Amino acid sequence: MVANKSMDFSVCVFCGSPEEIERDHVPPKCLFPAPAPNNLITVPSCRKCNQSFSKDEEYFRVIVSQIAEAQSHPATRKLLNEKILKSMTRRPKLATKIMSSVVPVHIYDGEKFMGTGAGFDLENQSFDRVMIKIVKGLLYHEKGIRVSEAFVVKWNVIHERIKIAARLHKALENSPVHALGDNVFEYQGYVLKGSAASFWLMRFYLGPTFYAAIFDRSKLEAQNR
């Protein structure tokens, strides 16, 4: 994929600061085993924001790579052996946090209950921060638009009863699929003309699909009253 040539690298895409601007990877570079692919996406980030995501990204990498549907991807096995196990040994708090995220899940074959297995609780601040970071970065990469305070980023919106989500999902059907690395990360995006409002589908390691959207905050609040 060719990077957006009009992208402004003078301010941080996450906080708007013009200080100590660096290039940050979206999605995080740590998701890709070595050698890293040559089509990684970078966006402008101040050093403070860039460094603030580091521990959250390590946690995020473990979760998305070890979700059952993603474990068969060759990249996840390589990451587990070369990076993840070492990272968890070096950072006992990370290992403890991962274990605390494991929850029982019911397994079904169609409507037939097959038993109980283990899954991950994704409703936590670390996972949320990285997912929002990725969505903001993708919008900036595709359209050069920074998400202002007038908009709100929500992920897994497919499970919410928001009318605009269904409309955007329909529009997204004809959007191209972009892949980074050996399908380590795939995404589709649909952006409303002249706005940050958009809808995104993302997959990590050919695992389950994550849905995210950027909504006009005032319209979302009015709709949910």
Image: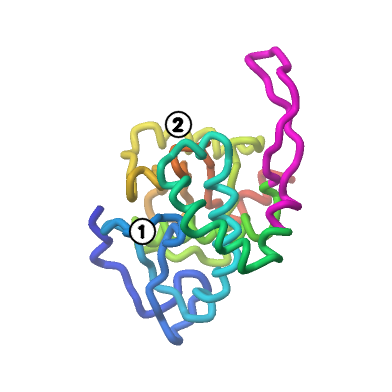
* 214 in relation to 24, above or below: above
| Residue 157 visible in this rendered orientation of the protein | yes
Viewer-nearest residue: 109 or 46: 109
Tell me: 47 left or right of 91.
left
10 Å neighbourhood of mark 2: few (<14), some, or many (≥20)?
few
Q: Nearer the viewer, residue 217 or 49?
A: 49
The percent position of residue 175, horizontal first and vertical second, equals 34, 38
Checking the image for residue 170, the label placed there is: 2
Kindly report the distance in space between the C-alpha atoms of the residues bearing marks 2 and 1. 36 Å
**Which residue sits at x=63%, y=49%?**
220
Task: Say whether marks 2 and 1 touch (CB < 8 Å).
Answer: no
The image shows residue 77 at horizontal and vertical percentages of: 47, 45
Q: Is residue 161 left or right of residue 198?
A: right
Q: Position of residue 4 (x, y in %)?
A: 27, 61
Span highlighted in magenta in the image = 97-121
Dominant secondary-structure state across the stretch colored magenta: strand
Nearest the eye: 118 or 171:
118
Name the residue that disc number 1 marks.
Answer: 34
Q: Amino acid at mark 1?
A: Ala
